[in-house]
Amino acid sequence: MRHLISSLLLGCAALSATAQEFPSRPISFIVQYAPGSGADQLVRVITDVVHREHSARFVIRNIPGAVGVIGTTTLVKSPADGYTIGICSASINSAATSLMKSLPYDTTSDFTFIEPLASYTYVVSSAPELGFTSLDELIRHSAANPDKLSYMYSNATAQVLAASLTRAIGLKALPVPYKATQEGLNDLSQNRVSFGVTDTGVTAPMVRTGKVKALAVIAPRRSISLPDVPSLVELGKPAIDVMAWAGVCGPKDMPSEAVTWLRERLRKARNDPDTLEKFKLLGLDPINLGSVSFPDFVAAQLNLWTEAARNAGIQPQ
């Protein structure tokens, strides 16, 4: 009996140590977009802080394609042990259901929603060779040259925002999807497409070097990363009232100890002063939901983006 009790005590101690030791190995972080994308930049800023403060190791896995569907499918089919996490976002969990007739996962029930991180600002930029100095010039050129312009986007969020924008201000242009934002911006800089709708974090460096011309930010106010670029509201254009957001999630039914460990450290990293300064450069605003739960936020955002896609006239493919 004494040996049995000792064995049980040792077993309990081992289980307790295992629970306290999360993470005991590197955590795989799936980013459903290309290296250098806005989501990739956000993840690297956050994980660098968690690694610095807690010695946790993250392995970033970029799995781009199909506006995030390929990487997300990999994420939701991964073991729900806490050692595989990824991005959840307006593109993946809010807009995708309105763009595709079917998805290989449910955008609300197939995830463990861990912690929101930030919201993005998107910007309308044009090819420098076209010589536009304002959004109104682009609109007038479109009216005089119907169906001769094209625009690029690289994720579901940008697709809905671009469709909403072009319908709201009467722009006639052919949509051109890209696998990666940087690839689309490179083509934009060489006048292979006329304008683009992209996040400010990736776009701002190309604006500063004159490779693309920023015409307006799709937001109620100017972006701190592009302070000289007017907002749609400032220009007297219709507001597009949806939030481009991003956070961290994992496969459904992750163990509670892993979720708690990750949530606490991600939240602390998001609010770190160094993180907030980097967010400013990337045109990001931290998301703090207060008393609203992350799953409730995701459900509300799904409704808002579904309505925006419907109002923009987007037909699921």
Image: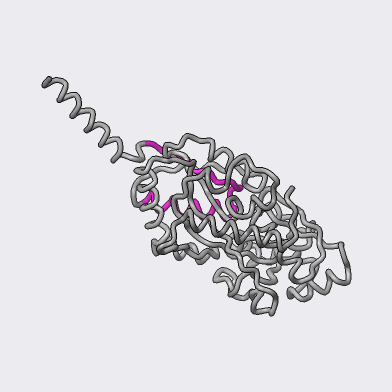
Q: Residue at 59% x, 65% y: name it.
A: 121
Instruction: From the top left corner, tell me how far across and down residue 233 is, in percent.
Output: 65, 77
Instruction: From the top left corner, tell me how far across and down residue 226 is, in percent.
Output: 60, 70
Residue 23 vs residue 114, the one in the foreground: 114
Q: Is residue 49 magenta?
A: yes
Instruction: From the top left corner, tell me how far across and down residue 174 is, in percent.
Output: 81, 58
Question: Is 294 placed above or below 285 here?
Answer: above
- The quadrant in which residue 206 appears is bottom right
Residue 41 vs residue 289: left or right?
right
Q: Residue at 75% x, 63% y: name it.
A: 195
Residue 54 vs residue 147: left or right?
left
Question: Is 282 placed above or below 14 here?
Answer: below
Residue 209 vs residue 12, the one in the foreground: 12
Part of the protein shown in magenta: 25-52
Instruction: From the top left corner, tell me how far across and down residue 124 is, in percent.
Output: 69, 66
- What is the residue that sits farthest to the left in this orientation? 2
Q: How is the image coloured?
A: one colour
Quadrant of image for the N terminus: top left
Residue 124 vs residue 175: left or right?
left
- How many discs mark residues in the rendered view? 0
Question: Is 227 placed above or below 23 here?
Answer: below
